[in-house]
Image: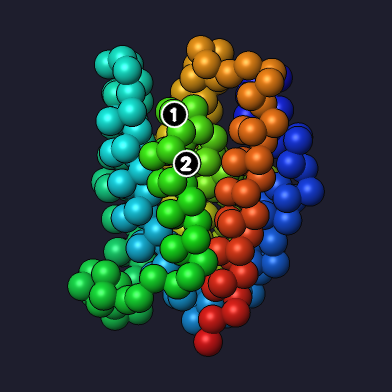
Amino acid sequence: MDIFDRLQQSCAEDWTRYVDHSFVRQLALGTLPEEKFRAYLIQDYLFLIQFARAQALAVFKSRSLADMRAAHRGLAAILDVEMDLHVRLCAGWGLSTSEIEAAPEHNATIAYTRFVLDCGTAGDLLDLHVALAPCVIGYAEIARSIVAARGEVAAEHPYRQWIAEYAGDAYQDVAEAARRQLAVLAERSMTERRFPELCAVFAKATRLEADFWQMALDAG
């Protein structure tokens, strides 16, 4: 059992509410109203801008080249993979990049991203990666579970591209690398006395993820 398993098990109820949220279930079935997904997608783009800052902060907080390279890979995954996906999907609805970037941040977006940045600013690299983990690793788990439950997603599924992106090898590798880095950092600087503090960070980030789904459902 690695540190992620321990954190996940310690926050099992919060984790289930996040990965099995109504937004996720509707997305998996393809019944999620388009305007809800569009609201999510725009906010998630703004969310990723702040998460890119968090990965850049991880570079700054790193004390070794190995840690810096790990953070750089996470930053590249956001800037070169995830954000491109969002731009392509939004373009399908006639939304330009400038329009997306001009959208106001929702309170749920601000709450989560600033919490992560605060964890990284006030804490160390382990605190930051624990705060990032529900998003980075959780998305991979959600997409993988959708594919495992439904098999190959039909071509006519409205959210096929999103599911394929996060269930695909490229993003699964990103999530696995984040999990390995979290384990490395925990082996280096975690103590049993510190574990409850890390659980609190992980639980809060997980609840904020669920709030982010709910924000999209409540939109419109």
| Residue 179 left/right relative to 214 | left
Q: Position of residue 181 (x, y in %)?
A: 47, 23
Q: What element carries label 1?
A: loop
Where residue 40 sits: x, y (%)? 48, 69
Between residue 173 and residue 205, name the one nearer to us. Answer: 205
Residue at the extreme right of the image, as rendered = 13
Q: Relative to 69, is 171 on the left or the right?
A: right
In this rendering, does residue 28 appear at all? no
Circle on res. 158: none
Q: Which of 123 and 141 is in front in this view?
A: 123
As drawn, the label of residue 124 is 1
Rounded to the nearest angstrom, the CA distance separating label 1 from label 2 is: 8 Å
- The residue located at (31%, 15%) in the rendering is 64
Residue depicted at x 41% and y 46%: 117
Please tell me in which quadrant of the rendered image residue 12 appears: top right
Considering every residue shown, the one lying at the far left of the view is 98
Rendered view: 203 above or below 125: below
Q: Is residue 28 above or below residue 53?
A: below
**Label 2: few (<14), some (14–19) or many (≥20) C-alpha neighbours in 10 Å:** many
In this picture, is 91 found above or below 168? below
* Residue type, numbered disc 2: Cys
Viewer-side residue, 109 vs 174: 109
Classed neighbour count for the residue bearing mark 1: other residues with Cα under 10 Å, few (<14), some (14–19), many (≥20): some
Task: Quarter of the image for the N terminus: give it.
Answer: top right
What residue is at 29 percent from the left and 72 percent from the top?
Answer: 100
Q: Which residue is drawn at 53% across and 77% down?
A: 36
Figure colour scheme: rainbow
Circle 2 SS class: helix
- First-in-chain label (1 vs 2): 2
Question: Mark 1: which amino acid?
Answer: Asp
Give how far across and how far down residue 131 sits, in percent. 52, 41
Q: Which residue is under mark 2?
A: 119
